[in-house]
Structures are given as structure tokens and as C-alpha cells.
Image (tube, rainbow, N blue to C red):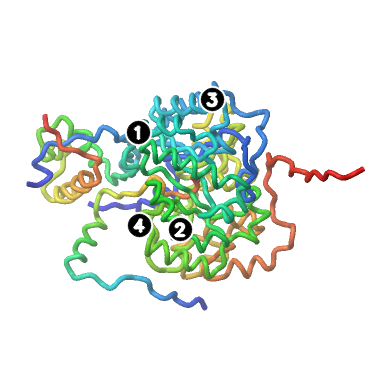
Amino acid sequence: MSVAVPLVEHFARGLDAPICLTWELTYACNLACRHCLSSSGRRDPAELSTAEARAVIDELERMQVFYVNIGGGEPTIRPDFWELVDYATAHHVGVKFSTNGVRVTPEVAERLAQSDYVDVQISLDGATADVNDAVRGEGSFAAAIRAMEHLAAAGFSGFKVSVVCTRHNFPQLDSFQALADRYGAQLRLTRLRPSGRGADVWDELHPTAAQQRELYDWLLAHGENVLTGDSFFHLAGYGGDALPGLNLCGAGRVVCLIDPVGDVYACPFAIHDAFRAGNVRDDGGFAAVWRASELFRTLRGPQAGGACAACSAYDACRGGCMAAKFFTGLPLDGPDPECVKGFGAVRLAAVEPGSAPRPSLDHSRPAAVPVTIGRR
Amino acid sequence: MSVLDQAWELAPQVSVRPEPFGALLYHFGTRRLSFLKDRRLLAVVEALGDAPSARHACAGAGIGPSDIGAYERALARLAATDMLRERTA
Amino acid sequence: MDQPPASTAPETAPPADEDEELLEEDLLVEDVSIDGMCGVY
């Protein structure tokens, strides 16, 4: 008996339904994180109604999507947030929601601790307030810790603490693990992409090449219980042990994004017309977009290695992250900007400043104008 | 005793999704995904709940003696990852 | 042109584990965490 096609090939060719997906419920947010991948802040006037959101959940149930990661913006500030979470779990769609913790009160924590089908992911980008708040804003560290205290007190073990790895929080990896341990949570480390507002801070915040190598080694040594969302699959180019995960770009193949106005994108790091597959309000809804969109058909076909095809690491890294390449102005059939062999850095030097594509949408709140009170 | 001689059932928190290449199993409690790489294995898994033993389920799915070892290993793996649980009734 | 990276592989295991590895490869079941696919945050 032979297994003709390797499993990862089945996934690369795309499935009839996503395995899971990200669903950004609103562009509204109480924070203004400097690296926000969705450039969130203000609600969009055209966001899906409660009824439209329920219709999406009905479709996900029919397609047997196993779970959705509900995010935003800050999803808990939508008035119908709990109604939609309950509707999803009642319709066999598991929910994990990403939150800055603003609304995770003791009562909310109790409610969550009792549900088998709802998971929580608290966003945190520093193990100390100074490092965290420099990116996420004053008071955000305190709010996240409060949420974690409430979850721990309610007996919810195994909730996620999700960290975007940056140049400045890199020295705190062990501290993040200790923090997660203290609250009975599971640590999640993910890759910073130059997406949304991330484009403006990427040069400043992305880990150095040396840090990236240390991160890889740290994950191999300490990362047995650390989740990564497979976001470091470009590190497979180091050629050592593989990190856990499918080690493949799932965008448009096994995962995708549904945004607050119902647009379907290949992934949440690629909110741009170039990666927009359709809208759930179109005829045939989400299912038709997933199965028949031109963009997804292209992603599910053979991918050209281009400049990378001759590199010995290509089989492992597959040229890295398309969103990272796109938003740094690199060609998609060439190296990742953080290519572990340094080929991306070389290509970046040739990118004309200001020429990289900008995000198609920006829901950022206008920067606060400092108020000066002068004497008359 | 081999897994083949025991009675099994899918754990209650497991969702089964058939695929052209086999099936996906997702356990809502452990958050693990298991890929069944073979449609006959899916047939075996779906028959387990009503079969007196896994061996019976395999026979019903047309698994012959030369292949049964691979199915035994697969079922053992599913049991080890809590996708399957022993049936008491 | 590109140099092979330093190996980070552990020391080789005794032969019994090699047999297990072979069996792993033709195992009809493969597992991954639902968190293990890129494109969901």
C-alpha cells in the first residue's frame, strides 16, 4: 500500500474548505499598537451586521471549518461579540479570540473557563510594561496582566499569551515563558510582518539576523510547549531540525482571513487588493470565494521558485512569506526579506525607498494632537 | 492485548471531516488535528463504534492480512492521541 | 555558493529507534497542532 502524495502536498494544493481561519470582526480598537497588522482603530461603516455574521457562521458550519480565530481590531468591543461566539460554538465551530484583555473581567473569565469550545489569546509584546507599552500604548501591559489574573483565578488553564517577536522584546524570551507559566497559560511567539502599520515600524522592530538565529535555537531548545502558528517556517532554511508545524504557507490553501466588511483575503498579513479573493456578500457567499476565486486558484497551483529555485534551502523554506516580501517591495518569486542566508537583505538594499506597496485600507485613528496650554 | 482486539469509539469531542485523500480529525479538547491518509482508514474509524472489536471493523472495511499491521499502528496512534477511546459497552 | 549551516541535529539514536522512524514514515496517521499552520494569528 503506498501513499502517493505527501500530506503537505495535499495542503499546498488547497482543500475544499479551510481547516481554520482568522475572522476580524471589527476595525474598531481601544488601542493603537504601532505594528497593527490590520491598521485598526476606527470601526468601518460597512462592517457585517449580526445577521450577516451569523450567515457566515452557518457557512463555516456547513463547510466544517473546525475553528475560527476571532480578532480585529479589538473584537470584544462589538456589542454582539458574545452572541456571535455562542452562535459559533452552538454551530460546531470552535472559537479562539485574540484580545488585548480590555473586557476580560472576572465574570467574563468565569464564563470562558466553563466553555470547552472557546479559547482566549491575550496579546502581549513585552514581559515588562516599558517594553510592552512602547509598542502597544500606556496601560496596555497592565490591562493584559489583569486579564491573565482573572483567567487564572477562574481556573482557565492553557489560555494563550501571544507575543510578536521584535528586536526589543527578544531578550525577554525566558521572561515571557515565566510569565505564561505563572498564569497557567501557554506561550505563543509569532513573527512580525511588515503588514498594516507594521510597514512603518518594520525596519526599526524586526529582529536582527543574529537574533533570528538565536530565536531558532531557543525554539528548538525550549520551545516544546511554545506555539508559533507556524509563522517561522522561513527559518527552515537554516537546514537544522524542523520546527513543529506544517512548514508551509497556508494562505488561500488551508486558511484565510475574513475581514470586518466581509472581504476575504489570503491571510491577515496580506490585507491588500493584490491578495483579496472576494467578499462574503457576493453570490455564493464565503464558500464560492474559497472554492472558485481566481486568486486562490493561483495560490493552489505550482509556485515559481524564481530567484530562489537554485538555492539549496528552497525545498525547506519555499521562499518564505509572501506578505513579508510584498510589503517590503520585494518580488514574490525571490527571497524573503529575512532570508536566513541573507539573500533577502541584499535584495532589500536595491528597493527604492517609498516604492513598497502600501496597505489598501487604513482604519487607524488620527494621531492625538498634543495639547499645549499656553499663557495669554 | 493489541488494539485490534479491543472495542473503540471516537472520543466525543472529535469532529471528522472526510477529504478526497482520507480525512481530517479535530479534537476540540486537545486541539490536535489528525490526518488520516487513507479512505479505508476512515471507513474503519467510522465503523469502530458499532464493531465488537477493531479487528472486526478492519475486516468489514476489506483490510487484508498483509495490510492489517499498518492499520493496527494507525489505530494505536489515534488511541494514544485521545482521538479514540475504549468502549465499555 | 551558500555554505551548509552547522548541524543542530542530536546524536544518532540506537538502531531500535531507526525501526520506529521507518514505521513513522508509513504511518497512515499524521498529527499536527491546529496552531501549526501559517496564516492564522
Residue A321 position within the rendered picture, expressed as x and y whole percent measured from the top left: 54, 56
**Same subunit under labels 1 and 3?**
yes
Q: Secondary structure at mark 3?
A: loop
Q: CA distance from mark 2 to mark 3?
A: 36 Å
Q: Earlier in the sequence, mark 4 or mark 3?
A: 3
* C-alpha span from label 2 to label 4: 16 Å
Q: Nearer the viewer, mark 2 or mark 3?
A: 2
**Numbered disc 2: what chain?**
A
Q: Which mark is residue A116?
A: 1
Please state which amino acid type lies under the numbered disc 2: Ser
Q: Secondary structure at mark 4?
A: helix
Residue hosting label 2: A175
* Front-most of residues B86 and A179: A179
Looking at the picture, does residue A337 appear above or below residue A372?
below
Q: Which residue is mark 4?
A: A224
Q: CA distance from mark 2 to mark 1?
A: 29 Å
Residue marked by disc 3: A80
Q: How many numbered dots are placed on residues in this image?
A: 4
Q: Earlier in the sequence, mark 4 or mark 1?
A: 1
The residue carrying pointer 2 sits among few (fewer than 14), some (14 to 19) or many (20 or more) residues within 10 Å by Cα, namely: some
Query: Which of the chains bears the disc numbered 4?
Result: A
Q: Nearer the viewer, mark 2 or mark 4?
A: 2
Q: Is residue A210 above or below residue B9?
A: below
Q: The disc labelled 4 sits on which kind of residue?
A: Glu
Q: Which chain hosts label 1?
A: A
- Which amino acid type is marked by label 3? Asp
- Label 4 to label 3, Cα distance in Å? 37 Å
